[in-house]
């Protein structure tokens, strides 16, 4: 009898263990880590698990010189960037970049929820911050790739404009060349492990005194909008039926792109950099906005806000244009990112009233903020604003949802580390020519 009782107890314990193991397995299932789940379901599941600190961390982007793997882990930072010249070492090889990228990414993956980071870099005419990368003509040169250059005229009549656009279509710009340059650039960026580029610049330069006119494809918005085909090269061709405004990145050899600088940066008074663009609604929508319409249609993942102002209102604090127009009217569903310390410059001198600058920038609709030097100050300020009900949780959730959407679309949760199979593509004449021609 004692033996029978012992056997019953043993069987009971085994059953409990099995049931406990099953319950534990079910409890540990995380839908956001399941690539079979729809993106919106994964976003909802992950956001439901996130603490406020982790959400604000996702909204923060630091320069690589001021970050460590431990910082990525402890603050769940959403992104790192390389500012101009911010490199692992002089004449860094692709392997140097990959080693650095993976160290930071492993820090992110070791955080409580393991949310991978996105790494951004300027690549506006090739991977131009990287030693031995292929450098392409700047935008002003690419915008001049049409077969006939006789259109340096101003046309005012409707019929004249119609004829102009028909001629443009007949003689053709070369958006296909620009698209292929985008594909070649993406490949070289991926050769260093990086997955996000601050390109293209789709400014419409209206005054040659502007010192950054070389970043503009043309003074003509029709040319600029055609040149947005570079996004298709950087990110890949979006599938038929993709809803307008939804970001798209089409594979391991592609990168997330960033249309910049929203909006009117090429139209400032007297061409003064970061100055004021004085313009009526029709002019803004017909001259400076077409490039953004077309970028959004082509699935651009992110949009960067301009340092400049529109009719006296700093773009980094412009709720009307960033939230109401870009997000609500144009239905852009990727994330909006600030420029380098762009939020600091909302007030003058820069950073003189940082708490109010941060409040204005987040309220305007900026989702990810470049705070290259001091992440703790930014995070503390945003946390205080949320706790004091100055920034509603709905605004934080909107920002984080957009950032996570881009990360899921990029496949970062499945392939967070650098793919070393592209290393030999950096500066390779054969692969570059193959991509372009």
Image (spheres, rainbow, N blue to C red):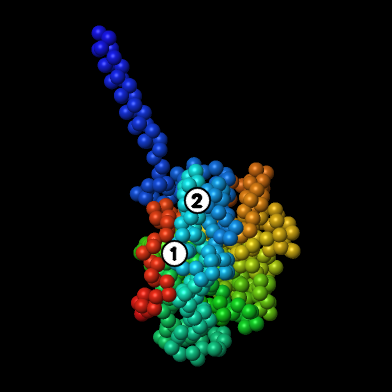
Where residue 94 sits in the image (x, y, percent)?
A: 45, 67
Q: Please give the name of the residue rendered at 46% of the width and 84% of the height, measured from the top-left corner.
A: 145
Q: Is residue 292 above or below residue 23?
A: below
Q: Please give the name of the residue rendered at 43% of the width and 50% of the height, measured from the top-left corner.
A: 40
Query: In the rendered image, which quarter is residue 156 located in?
Result: bottom right
Where residue 366 sits in the image (x, y, percent)?
A: 59, 58
Q: Residues within 10 Å of mark 2 (few under 14, many from 20)?
A: many
Q: Please give the name of the residue rendered at 58% of the width and 45% of the height, measured from the top-left corner.
A: 53
State the quadrant of the C terminus. Answer: bottom left
State the quadrant of the N terminus. Answer: top left
Foreground pick, 426 / 348:
426
Instruction: Say if mark 1 contacts mark 2, CB within 8 Å.
Output: no
Q: Residues within 10 Å of mark 1 (few under 14, many from 20)?
A: some
Q: Is residue 135 above or below residue 39?
A: below
Image disc number at residue 402: none
Query: In the rendered image, which quarter is residue 328 located in?
Result: bottom right
Q: In the drawing, does residue 425 fall left or right of residue 59?
A: left
Asked if residue 71 shows in the view, the reply is yes
Image disc number at residue 95: 1
Q: Secondary structure at mark 1?
A: helix
Image disc number at residue 107: 2
N-terminal of the two: label 1 or label 2?
Answer: 1
């Amino acid at each position: 009898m004692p033996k029978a009782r012992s056997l019953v107890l043993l069987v009971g314990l085994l059953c409990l263990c099995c049931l406990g193991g099953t319950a534990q397995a079910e409890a540990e299932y995380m839908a956001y880590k399941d690539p079979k789940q729809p993106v919106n379901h994964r976003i909802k599941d992950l956001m439901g698990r996130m603490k406020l600190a982790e959400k604000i961390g996702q909204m923060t982007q630091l320069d690589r010189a001021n970050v460590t793997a431990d910082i990525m882990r402890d603050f769940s930072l959403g992104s790192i960037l390389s500012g101009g010249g911010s490199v692992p070492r002089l004449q860094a090889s692709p392997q140097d970049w990959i080693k650095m990228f993976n160290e930071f990414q492993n820090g992110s993956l070791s955080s409580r929820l393991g949310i991978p980071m996105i790494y951004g870099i300027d690549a506006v005419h090739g991977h131009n911050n990287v030693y031995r990368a292929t450098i392409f003509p700047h935008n002003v040169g690419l915008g001049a790739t049409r077969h006939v250059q006789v259109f340096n005229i101003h046309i005012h009549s409707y019929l004249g404009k119609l004829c102009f656009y028909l001629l443009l279509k007949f003689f053709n710009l070369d958006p296909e060349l620009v698209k292929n340059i985008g594909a070649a650039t993406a490949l070289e960026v991926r050769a260093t492990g990086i997955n996000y580029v601050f390109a293209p610049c789709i400014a419409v330069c209206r005054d040659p005194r502007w010192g950054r006119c070389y970043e503009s494809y043309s003074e003509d918005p029709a040319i600029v909008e055609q040149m947005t085909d570079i996004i298709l090269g950087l990110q890949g061709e979006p599938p038929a039926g993709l809803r307008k405004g939804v970001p798209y990145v089409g594979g391991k050899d592609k990168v997330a792109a960033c249309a910049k600088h929203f909006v009117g940066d090429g139209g400032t008074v007297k061409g003064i950099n970061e100055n004021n663009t004085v313009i009526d609604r029709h002019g803004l929508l017909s001259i400076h906005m077409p490039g953004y319409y077309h970028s959004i249609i082509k699935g651009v993942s992110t949009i960067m806000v301009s340092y400049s102002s529109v009719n006296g209102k700093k773009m980094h604090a412009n709720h009307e244009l960033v939230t109401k127009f870009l997000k609500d009217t144009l239905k852009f569903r990727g994330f909006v990112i600030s420029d380098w310390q762009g939020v600091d410059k909302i007030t003058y001198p820069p950073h003189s009233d940082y708490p109010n600058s941060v409040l204005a920038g987040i309220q305007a609709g900026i989702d990810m903020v470049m705070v290259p030097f001091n992440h703790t100050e930014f995070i503390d300020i945003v946390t205080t604003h949320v706790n004091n009900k100055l920034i509603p949780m709905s605004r934080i959730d909107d920002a984080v949802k957009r950032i996570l959407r881009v990360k899921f679309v990029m496949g970062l949760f499945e392939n967070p580390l650098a793919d070393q199979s592209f290393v030999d593509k950096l500066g390779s004449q054969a692969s570059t020519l193959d991509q372009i021609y």
